[in-house]
Amino acid sequence: MNVKDLLNITDGSLIVGNSEFNLDGRDFVKDSREVKEGDIYVALKGEKFDGNDFYLDAVNKGAKVCIITKNLTDEELKIVKNKCINIIKVEDTLGALQKIAKFKRNLYNIPVVAITGSVGKTSTKDMIASVMKEKYNTLKTEGNYNNEIGVPLTILRLNNEEAMCIEMGMNHFGEIRKLTNIARPTIAVITNIGTAHIGNLGSRENILKAKMEILEGLIGNTVIINNDNDLLNKWAIENKDKYNIITYGIKNNSKFMAKSIKSYENKSEFYINNQKIIVPVGGEHFVLNSLCAIAVGNELNIPMDKIAEGIKNLDLSKKRMEIIKNEIGTTIINDTYNANYDSMKAAIEYLKEIKNKRKIAVLGDMLELGSYSEKLHKDVGLLVDKNIDILITVGKESKYIAEKSNAKEIYEFDSNNQAIEKLKSIITKDDVILLKASNSMNFNEITNSIK
């Protein structure tokens, strides 16, 4: 692409610059502080900031193209003309970013796997990408870049890669629809339908509808689902004649099923089609993630031994069932990125299975649950039984977890600092500590204080 392409795609106007300026190999950046020499800066607007206020910072750091919405003063025009850069004015910078990403995606005829679901999106994406890398140079979503900004920025990183693995998140109806029509996946993956964001959407059935928007941008008709999930199982039965539905599961009869599962503190093992699979993370939910990755790998004609190698070499994103050993030998399970009932259940069940250690669960509020909040926190509390030695809760809503828990010892706190003080007074080398809450509870603060 060149600047002229950007102008045509975004219906923008070139305030300063050269329309033939080449954009190949240049990064799109939304934060002026992260700009490097040659980058393309996009001045996005948020509730509390306006990227247009920082475009000159981007220019001074070496940006060669700035996409903005503001009118320039005479003084600003003089500055940018002396810098010999390109300034493009558009009506809406976010809309422009999305249009550019969609244009770029359509230039490539490559496999694109898109993943959504109520829980496990990121870890499943990591697992699938690890398998895809056994055959393709694969671009994957990094960090939390799974929204209306992150997905376009991910696609715009595409350079020499031969495939993409894209995570798609949402809070409301219409968000997945927008993302899938930008990414145009060739395979759609739905990990499960749970209770995340139920406060916004009102019911699990509505969450299913919102997640299934992913199919609106699908090229072809291949859909991979977790058949153990009740709503997805029902959906698959009702839509078996409309789509090429590939199922995976542990409990319900599926095309890809794990046999002879063995669980350990830091790994799981199982067999599928006589192939031994070693998952370098414990917990049944990671067995499901592996089965999903196997289904994707099979669809992409990756040999089973290569699929197994990809799973074994999993590089998991931080703060997702991240196992840390601190200085005294305590095992810390850092699963602090986010939380809802389904992910809480999976993490607690994993903690319960660990042998020969004192088990401590530090649990905080789950957010965006609306009128369901009290019930779902109490449901989590019922999971924390006498198999958990110590329960520590932090936050207003998590008091409902403590109320229903039957753990051997229970402590309730209002702040992370109180929880940190308690943990430091009791932890030993023989403990295993699970830390889990919604991201805005900032539980990583607790992790950093005890690791």
Image (cartoon, grey):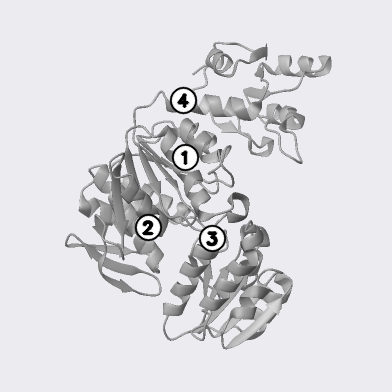
For the view shown, which residue lies furthest in the bottom direction?
Answer: 408
- Residue 306 drawn at (x, y percent): 24, 51
For the residues marked 2 and 3, what is the alpha-carbon distance in whole angstroms? 17 Å
Looking at the image, residue 115 sits to the left or right of residue 259; the answer is: right
How would you rate the neighbour count of disc 3 (Cα within 10 Å): few for under 14, some for 14-19, many for 20 or more? Answer: some
Mark in front: 2 vs 1: 1
How would you rate the neighbour count of disc 2 (Cα within 10 Å): few for under 14, some for 14-19, many for 20 or more? Answer: many
Q: Earlier in the sequence, mark 3 or mark 4?
A: 4
Q: Earlier in the sequence, mark 3 or mark 1?
A: 1
Task: Identify the residue shown where x is 46% and y is 36%.
Answer: 180
Q: In the picture shown, does residue 212 fall above or below 437?
A: above
Mark in front: 1 vs 4: 1
Location of mark 3 (residue): 319
Q: Earlier in the sequence, mark 1 or mark 4?
A: 4
SS class, disc 1: helix
Q: Amino acid at mark 2?
A: Asn
Q: In the picture shown, does residue 404 fall above or below 106?
A: below
Numbered tag placed on residue 213 in the rendering: 1
Q: Quadrant of residue 48?
A: top right
For the view shown, which residue lies furthest in the front direction?
Answer: 238
Q: Earlier in the sequence, mark 2 or mark 1?
A: 1
Mark in front: 3 vs 1: 1
- Residue 229 drawn at (x, y percent): 39, 59
Task: Identify the residue shown where x is 72% and y is 14%.
Answer: 81
- Residue 435 drawn at (x, y percent): 57, 70
Numbered tag placed on residue 104 in the rendering: 4
For the residues marked 2 and 1, what is the alpha-carbon distance in whole angstroms? 22 Å
Q: Label 1 near label 3: C-beta < 8 Å?
A: no
